[in-house]
Amino acid sequence: MENIPVRNIITAEQGEPFNNFSIRDLRELLAGKDMVQELHRHNFFYVLALKKGKGTHEIDFTSYDVADNTIFFMRPGQVHQLTLKAGSTGYLMSFTTDFYSTQNTTGHQLLRKASSMNHYRSDNDGCNKLTTPLDNIYREYNAKQEQYQEVIKANLHIFFVELARQYNKASSGNMNLYTQERLEEFLSLLETHITNVKQASEYADMMHLSLYQLNAVIKATLNKTCSEMINEHIILEAKRYLLATSSQVNQIADSLGYEDVSYFIRFFKKHTGSTPEVFRQQFRSV
């Protein structure tokens, strides 16, 4: 079974004292050339903050135009493909969960909310509120004065708060704290257990909820059922492997917990309209 290419954090210079955080200036990173990346995934959080930008960015098979005043925020495990034109300005920031580790639930919830949306588009005022802490982070990262890591984390927290505010504006606004926390817990469990847990009732048990209660949470927030979310996540992971690796369909089926490859093919076709191989051929020919 071939794995999807996974990229690690590349620090700005050799001998970097920690390898769980990096921030790069896009102007210096591009050096007057376009950036063209093939489909891959990361084992860290990835933030592309653009003051000015042109290009295309595909995240988990959703395509976005790269534009001015735009933030792209990716979670570990997501796959993406980026074309960034020369002359784009802003920052490329990477960090692991361990770097932004907090001892309280609020910090984890803030990161989860901020990274719930892959794409943020702001006006000039909103962009300034987001780039100001990034400017501070970049200066601290390069100056490396006493306790600079703590200053970076403090500014990272401010950055997440601003993103969470924009997330709240973009959402329906009627999600109460309990519902939000349960949804985030479900999505986290889904990412962790999707290969071996596929029954909605099992996720409800893990969350100490009835299936009715879990479905009510997902229906209220995403207007879907728990089973629909499970199926969507399986299909998404299958697409990731089909397009980012050359693994055979039976190998992909096995990695997703399906011993019967014929059943997996039928399942995939039911939810996408094509077989795994046809999907792979059609997407790569685009």
Image: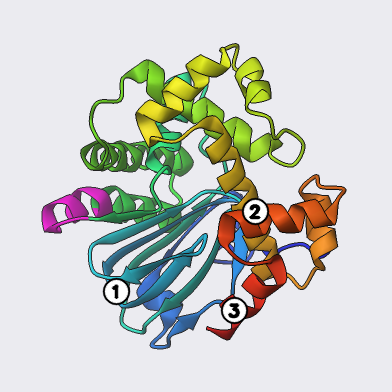
* Residue 254 on the magenta span: no
Which x, y percent locates residue 32? 38, 88
Does the rendering let one see residue 42? Answer: yes
Q: Residue furthest bottom?
A: 33
| Residue type beneath disc 1 | Gly
Q: Name the residue nearer the viewer: 224 or 74.
A: 224
Say which label, 2 or 1, has the lower sequence index. 1
Please identify, in this view, whether the residue under mark 2 or under mark 1 is nearer the observer.
2
Residue at image location 20% in from the left, 48% down from the top? 129
Compute the Cα span from label 2 to label 3: 17 Å
Please identify, in this view, whether the residue under mark 1 or under mark 3 is nearer the observer.
3
| Residue type beneath disc 2 | Glu
Residue at image location 65% in from the left, 22% down from the top? 201
Q: Which residue is mark 1?
A: 53
Magenta part, dominant SS = helix
Q: Is residue 212 above or below residue 219?
A: above
| Secondary structure found at label 2 | helix
Which x, y percent locates residue 33? 42, 88
> What range of the chain is rendered magenta?
122-131
Compute the Cα span from label 1 to label 3: 29 Å
Q: Name the residue nearer the viewer: 89 or 14.
A: 89
Dot 2, how many residues are within 10 Å of its Cα: few (below 14), some (14-19), or many (20+)? some
- Which label was assigned to residue 36? none
- Which label was assigned to residue 282? 3
Q: Which residue is mark 2?
A: 237
Q: Is residue 255 above or below residue 170?
A: below
Residue at image location 58% in from the left, 63% down from the top? 273
- Left or right for 156, reference 208: left
| Badge 1 vs badge 3, beta-carbon distance below 8 Å | no
